[in-house]
Each structure stands twice: as structure tokens, then as C-alpha cells.
Amino acid sequence: MKKSYKFTKLVNIGDIVFIFICFGIILFSFFQMINLPRGEYIKIEDGTRKVFVFSLESNVEKKIGGPLGDTIIVIQNNKARIQASPCNKKYCIHQGWVNKINETIVCIPNKISLSIIGKTPSYDSINY
Amino acid sequence: MTLSIIKPTKEDHQVAKLAALATVLSLIEFFLPSPIPGVKPGIANIITLYALIKFNFHVAFWVSIIRVLVTSILVGSFLNPTFFLSLTGALFSLGILFLTKNLYDKYFGLLSLSLVASIFHIIGQFIIVRIWIIPHDGIYNLLPLFLLSAFLFGLVNGIIVYRVLQQKPSKYNVK
């Protein structure tokens, strides 16, 4: 199996086609990332494994109690966010609005997590 | 008792030299700071491509695998997740090079060779990360960024390999 290449030219016709195809796929993947499918429901879990499910179309302001105090979750215009939280770093508030499937906001100090789910529940992880 | 003496062939010497070069490049890359974790230029793959073009697939395969093993032992990440990531990346890019190696020179040139290797490198790593390390769909949001970096560095590496192949052997070259 002795095979050696010549490669006298840097760019062939096929290369240009291939580069454009690759670039197209990358642009498409960026586009797909922006347009992820929107979720239908929001699932909120607190530290005691209590689960609340709301539709994203509802306009709800929900207070959920955690070990530090009350976290206020707002659902509005098909989006959800954490409006107020008693935790120190406020990462959960800075994450802002979420509305795409599998997007999650987690507040670890107050043991509250919310995630967006679609019409049919999808797997969040599969392990063997 | 009979002594069995392993006689290294000429190809073994070529593999050893190229693997040493690739290991050094890999180590240099390890110490380079990278703006985003995971985005690396992959300069050691220049040697793999060079081995594939100058010699054959067999040499390129062993250069790549030895490079991954030796670098991981030197850096101290042998059998770590990092090691399995780089091994998977190397195996995926070698696999796609094996499948497509007869197409080059006829239809495609060096740039496609380099691009296809780097893109399959990142795809293989992504599959491992998705199955094993971070089993969550959220990492797909990183895929466009990594594909873009693989695209850019693949192009750059292809151009470098072309320039290396154009070099005439210098008079200091020890045979």
C-alpha cells in the first residue's frame, strides 16, 4: 500500500467547493443554535423534590420557598425568569429570560431549579 | 535460549522521528494559553498530514497514536478524560482520512485533507463529550463555535503543510 500524493497546487476546484460546503454547514449550525425550538411548559423543582409545572403561556408570579428564603419566578409572554432570589451571587437572576427546550436556571444556594420542557418530555441525560 | 532481536525497519525510524516531532509540537501547544478552553490550533496534526502525504497511511496512523500516548504520559494526563478525548479525536480524524484518502490528488487538494481531518477530530470529541463527560443537550450550543475553530485551524494547518512540503532539503539535513 505505497501511496504518495503530489499536491503541486494548494487549491483545487474541489477544495473551493468543499470549503464553501463547510462554511455553509457552520453558518447553518449557528443559525440552528439561534432558532432552537421553543418550549411549552416550565418545570420548577425545589429542595424537597416538589415539582411544579406551568404552561409558558400563563402569566404567573410564583413564590417558591427554599432554605434561604423565597425565590420569585415570573412567567410572562412565553418566557420565564427568576426575578428575585435571596442567594448571594444572583447568578440565577443574571441568566435572564429562558424559553427554549432544555434551557435551565439553577439556584444552588436556595436549592431551586427550573427547566423548560417541550410537549413531549425529552430525556435530559442517558447513561449506560 | 534463543535471543530474539527486533530489527527496526526504515519505516520504524521514520515513524519514530515524526512521532518525536509531533510530540514536541503537542507539548508546545499544551503550554500555550488558549482563550477558550478546548479551542486549540492542533499543530501536531501538521506532522500527521505530512506523514500521510510523504509516506503512507500506516506511518501517519502510528505517528498520531504514539504522539497521543507519549504526550499524555509526559503531561500527566494518561487515562484521564483529556487523554480519551485526544485519542478519540485522533482516531476519528485518522478514520476519515483512511476512508477518503483515495479521493485526494484526483479531485481534492491539501486544504480539503486538512479540513476534513480537523472537523472530524472535533466531531469525534463532541460525541465522546455528549455520551460520557457531559451527558446534556446543552453542549450542542458549543458545537458551532468549535466547528468554526476547527474550520479556521484546519485551513491554516493545510497551508502550513503545503509550505512544509515545498521546502527543499537543506544542506544541514542529517540523513
Image (tube, coloured by chain):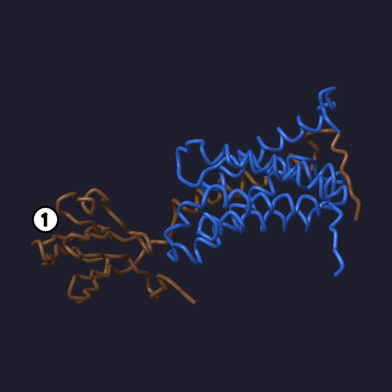
**Where in the figure is residue A41, as x and y percent of width and height?**
30, 69
Residue to which mark 1 is pinned: A86
- The amino acid sitting under disc 1 is Pro
Which residue appears at 48% of the width and 38% of the height? B34
Query: Which residue lies most toward the front here?
Result: B1
Say above or below: B24 vs B135. Answer: above
Residue A72 image position (x, y, % from top left): 13, 60
Residue B76 percent coordinates (x, y): 51, 51
Furthest residue to the right? A2
Colour assignment, chain B: blue
In this view, the residue in front, B171 or B30, is: B171
Q: Image check: A79 left or right of B71?
A: left
Q: Quadrant of residue A61?
A: bottom left
Palette colour of chain A: brown
Up the image or down, A6 lies above or below A53; here it is above
* Chain hosting mark 1: A
In the foreground, B26 or A34: B26
Residue toward you, A96 or B53:
B53
